[in-house]
Image: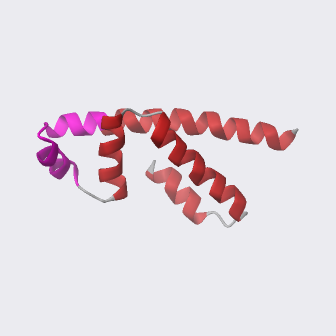
Amino acid sequence: MAMYMRQVQQENGDEQERGQLIQNLLRCIREDVSPRQRTMLLLYYGKGVSQPQIAASLGVNKSTVCRTIKRGEKRLRQCLRYGAQRYLMSMQE
């Protein structure tokens, strides 16, 4: 997810394409990850909260936070990969 966001920020391409990429990421976060994954991903990437701090605030083990974030990242990658393929195919038509 961090790599995806860096790519979006570094692109010098079209603003509309950048907006579409960000929109896809937000849709994936809303629809394709569990509420628990969403909470932890947003705390970790969105607010910069460390994994031990997330664990303490949610009352879970740090390893649970790590696993949950990794699973959420995997689901986001799958969603974004599918969305990118659809976008590229529509560009070729």
Tally of numbered discs:
0
Q: Give the residue displayed 35% in from the left and 46% down from the top.
A: 41
- Of 19 and 72, nearer the camera is 19
Give residue 4's position: percent from left, percent from top: 52, 51
Quarter of the image where the C terminus is located: top right
The image shows residue 42, relative to residue 75, as above or below, that is below
Work out whether 4 lies above or below 92: below
Nearest the camera: 2 or 55?
Answer: 55
* Most common secondary structure along the magenta stretch: helix
Q: Is residue 55 left or right of residue 49?
A: left
Q: Residue at x 46, y 41 (%)?
A: 30
> Residue 72: percent from the left, percent from the top?
39, 36
Residue drawn where x is 13% and y is 37% of the image: 61
Furthest-right residue in this view: 93
Q: Is residue 42 left or right of residue 76?
A: left
Q: Is residue 67 magenta?
A: yes
Quarter of image, res 79: top right
Please check the rendered image and state whether residue 22 is part of the magenta-colored stretch, yes or no.
no
Q: Which residues are magenta?
A: 50-68
